């Protein structure tokens, strides 16, 4: 008997996340007793700030968990606005002061983006981004019946943005927004002031939105500082005001505070934009947990008074990156691995491969070194171009420097083993979940 469930075209288009598939396989193997270093997902292992836990315990002791406003609790919006204004206070932010009315609280940055696309896109509208990009963008946009387009960038030149003229070739009458992610997941690229201004000029010229995903703003791995969309200055007050009407900033507590499971994000924009996205919020999830908002407000207040927290966090990831780069030089001398400037990911290109996907699954499922193996993400999932990224992987710097070094050694030995098994025709991977 054939069941005809008659699903929508929208949901039929959606596909399971390759990252989540690898997670599911890793969990099965861990249950079988295998040690799996999960470098395939950006799940920080750094403890979250104690003030978050203490505040939630205090609030929970009241014995109530109430509905909150669909735009978010005022005390959290005020605290986050103060946090942003403090962050940009020592930088060149000349024409916009973030106010409480400019902030919307959502259930994570993913939800913030999904709601933004639902608020600004009609069916068939396009959003332009840059390959490689955070692959879930496609699904968020598909739910809004939109179409993702991508302009290519290359590892060989540090994932720098193309020229203004080249980017403009990808803008059509259907383009509704350009979305940029800096520091970038997966590449670790931090876009320069000039690159951000390049995108801003195109958004002004074509009267489209400039969506800036800045969830990794605090994750700095070198000397280069991120340049926020809120810092843009077009040297003309009228242009600045027009641009502010087109800017939508996405933020989150997940990475900088190691609070991925809390699922609280933010949209920052002009009040008319916030009001419309807030309506989508109201009709999708109603509201965000008041307990978690209370805890997060305390965490932001704590970081405002304890700047060493973020400095120590950055040092943690820099130490991991240093150890990883040294290990790559020793164990994987023939790969291309541009040093990332921000976030906590590393893109590694293996010139000898045509398609590295099979190797990634072989290493996870069939190989172990002393009972240990590594899960990484095949990078083709981060490209819209189906021919791109086939010989690249993304590594997340989510374990200690010693373990990162061990992981690179495991990858090196897995490569040798894979080549032997490939030659002998012995590879028989379990069906992907």
Image (cartoon, rainbow, N blue to C red):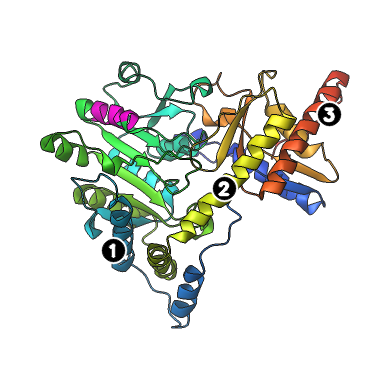
Q: Which residue is drawn at 80% across and 32% down?
A: 413
Q: Please give the residue where the numbered disc 2 appears in the rendered image.
A: 317
Q: Please give the residue where the numbered disc 3 appears in the rendered image.
A: 417
The reply to whether the C-beta atoms of the residues labelled 3 and 1 are less than 8 Å apart is no
Instruction: Report the side of 2 relative to 34 (left or right).
Output: left
Residue 170, given in percent of the width and then of the height, sits at 35, 20
| Frontmost residue, 207 versus 403 | 403
Mark 2, Cα crowd under 10 Å, few <14 / some 14-19 / many 20+, is many
Looking at the rendering, in which quadrant would you find the C terminus? top right
Dot 3 or dot 1, earlier in sequence:
1
For marks 2 and 3, give the one nearer the viewer: 2
The secondary structure that most of the magenta stretch takes on is helix
Instruction: Report the side of 396 relative to 79 (left or right).
Output: right
Q: Is residue 210 visible?
A: yes
Q: Please give the residue where the numbered disc 1 appears in the rendered image.
A: 78
Residue 390, given in percent of the width and then of the height, sits at 61, 23
Residue 384, given in percent of the width and then of the height, sits at 49, 25
The reply to whether the C-beta atoms of the residues labelled 1 and 2 are less than 8 Å apart is no
Q: Give the range drawn in magenta.
A: 194-203
């Amino acid at each position: 008997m054939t069941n005809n469930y008659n699903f929508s075209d929208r949901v039929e288009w959606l596909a399971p996340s390759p990252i989540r598939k690898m997670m599911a396989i890793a969990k099965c193997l861990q249950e079988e007793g295998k040690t799996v270093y999960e470098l395939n997902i950006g799940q920080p292992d750094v403890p979250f700030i104690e003030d978050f836990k203490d505040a939630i315990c205090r609030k929970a002791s009241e014995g109530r968990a109430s509905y909150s406003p669909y735009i978010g609790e005022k005390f959290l919006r005020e605290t986050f606005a103060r946090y942003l204004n403090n962050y940009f206070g020592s930088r060149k932010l000349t024409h916009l002061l973030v106010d409480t009315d400019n902030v919307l609280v959502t259930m994570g940055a993913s939800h913030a983006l999904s709601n933004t696309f639902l608020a600004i896109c009609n069916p068939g509208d396009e959003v332009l981004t840059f390959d490689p990009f955070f692959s879930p963008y496609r699904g968020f946009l598909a739910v809004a019946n939109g179409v993702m387009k991508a302009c290519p960038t290359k590892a060989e030149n540090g994932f720098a943005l193309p020229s203004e003229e080249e980017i403009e070739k990808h803008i059509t009458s259907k383009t509704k927004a350009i979305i940029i992610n800096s520091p970038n997941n997966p590449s670790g690229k931090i876009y320069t002031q000039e690159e951000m201004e390049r995108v801003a000029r195109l958004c002004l010229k074509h009267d489209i939105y400039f969506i800036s995903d800045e969830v990794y703003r605090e994750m700095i791995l070198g000397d280069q500082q991120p340049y926020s969309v809120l810092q843009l200055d077009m040297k003309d007050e009228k242009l600045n005001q027009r641009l502010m009407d087109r800017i939508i900033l996405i933020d989150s507590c997940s990475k900088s505070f190691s609070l991925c499971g809390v699922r609280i994000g933010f949209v920052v924009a002009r009040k008319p934009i916030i009001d419309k996205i807030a309506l989508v919020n109201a009709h999708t999830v109603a509201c965000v947990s008041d307990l978690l908002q209370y805890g997060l407000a305390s965490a932001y207040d704590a970081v405002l008074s304890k700047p060493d927290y973020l400095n120590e966090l950055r040092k943690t990831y820099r130490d991991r990156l240093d150890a990883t780069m040294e290990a790559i030089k020793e164990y994987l001398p023939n790969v291309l691995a541009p040093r990332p400037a921000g976030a906590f990911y590393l893109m590694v290109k293996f010139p000898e491969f045509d398609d590295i996907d099979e190797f990634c699954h072989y290493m996870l499922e069939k190989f172990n070194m002393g009972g240990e193996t590594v899960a990484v993400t095949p990078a083709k999932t981060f490209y819209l171009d189906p021919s791109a990224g086939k010989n690249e992987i993304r590594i997340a710097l989510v374990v200690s420097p010693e373990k990162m070094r061990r992981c690179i050694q495991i990858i090196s030995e897995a490569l040798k083993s894979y080549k032997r098994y490939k030659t002998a025709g012995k590879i028989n991977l379990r069906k992907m979940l």
